[in-house]
Image: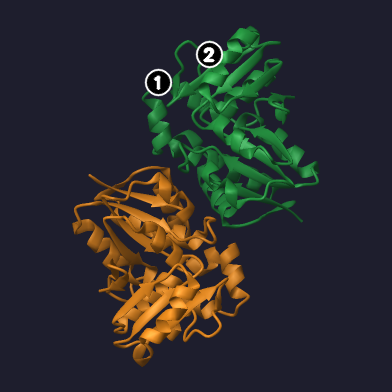
Chain colours: A green, B orange
Amino acid sequence: MKTIDVCLSPELMHLYDVRDRTVVVVDILRATSCMVTAFAHGVASITPFANLEACRAMKAKGYITSGERDGKKVEGFDKGNSPFEYMGDQVRDKKIAFTTTNGTQAIEKAKGAREIIIGSFLNLTSVARYLLLNEHNTLVVCAGWKGKVNLEDTLFAGALVEKLKDYIGPDCDAPLAAQYLYNLAKGDMVKFLSNSSHFNRLAKLGIEKDIAYCVTPDQFHVLPRLKGEALVI
Amino acid sequence: MKTIDVCLSPELMHLYDVRDRTVVVVDILRATSCMVTAFAHGVASITPFANLEACRAMKAKGYITSGERDGKKVEGFDKGNSPFEYMGDQVRDKKIAFTTTNGTQAIEKAKGAREIIIGSFLNLTSVARYLLLNEHNTLVVCAGWKGKVNLEDTLFAGALVEKLKDYIGPDCDAPLAAQYLYNLAKGDMVKFLSNSSHFNRLAKLGIEKDIAYCVTPDQFHVLPRLKGEALVI
């Protein structure tokens, strides 16, 4: 049986050998939710940057610059980190350079994996289907919050473990913990998350609408993957 | 309100400033369960070692040498890592030098904290009472398994969060996740853990009896703490 494991923080990545694994990077609030939304709306590519200034420099090359630090849009950038900025003509056929506090850092740390795909609740079933037919083991990398574990990324990991349970087995305790938490939360994820620290950090920024959107499963059937330096579908 | 946070793996310790915190180190299966058992049976002191050979050298100084690697007793050591070896005349008034795969490594990483105490289900209420009257914030450090998150240490952290919830608030998402998991598991922790990887790793070593013992709350009222290089009460 193939296996699925969950790395609850990018700071634990060194414990996992990813050379033969498919890595699913997840940052529900909000980087990977934005990415999936953008691809569903026809973006040409998204190039993730860990470094803010490297991202800013892409403006001169015709890219849209996008990103946040500590949840807030970066000054001088074209877009922030709300999925509602990544819809329709705002993104169609465009190239985006993207940097965020956690999500793009997690992608950077995952480089070296056999392949890297982008997960969010918005494309949950697309991710699950892909992993089912894929011949490699899976590692879900939760972006967390500045290295600390967060609930929303853990819930996504748990949703994947739950969906795949008859076909792909948990590799260690972290996927089991995530699965238990998801099964507790799935009836009303917004309510479940309303106690969480990151939720409250973002709620203070007035983005409750983003949060409700980001935990809605299966809005799109796209599967962004890293090809060279850029995400494409 | 004072706060409690949970570090789910010693590999995440660098994210926490522990200089002003009380750190509770927990390694349910089985290092901290052994330590609590030994103090309840009158051991004089337990000196934890991260390094195996440094531990072995203490034999010449009159110490009992104890420890395991990968769950198995170290060759040439007096004792392994079963709590049943730490009862009665086996330990009374003796000094022990102790090294384990995870627990004593976690203690080593926690050095620099304001204070370090030893937690297990066996002394759960003693730990909780101490934290209530203590003026500092708390960080529970789960020993995990070679850096990876495990369920049993997470459940202990959750039990503490649950017990203290009216008086000490969770500092981030990890204590909330631990609390949810504990509340799911508390009706039958052995059953809950029977799916877990570490449980099964140990079950193969024939220590089901140890496991049932190690998840039994409140067998003893002792609170081991690190004083200099040694644990005492």
Taking depth in this image into account, of A57 and B8 the one nearest to the observer is A57
Question: Hey, what amino acid is under mark 1?
Answer: Gly
Assess disc 1: are there few (<14), some (14-19) or many (≥20) residues with their C-alpha within 10 Å of its C-alpha.
few
Q: Quadrant of residue B35?
A: bottom left
Above or below, comparing residue A162 to residue A31 in the picture: below
Observer-nearest of B171 and B164 = B171
Chain under label 2?
A
The residue under label 1 is A206
Residue B195 in view here: no
The percent position of residue B50, horizontal first and vertical second, equals: 45, 67
Judging by the rendered image, the residue that carries numbered circle 2 is A79
Task: Answer with left or right where residue B151 lies relative to residue B37.
Answer: right
Q: CA distance from mark 2 to mark 1?
A: 16 Å
Residue drawn at (29%, 87%) of the image? B93
Image quadrant holding the N terminus of chain A, namely bottom right
SS state under label 2: loop
Instruction: Look at 67% across and 11% down and name the residue there.
Output: A94
- State which quadrant residue A36 falls in: top right
Q: Is residue B228 visible?
A: yes
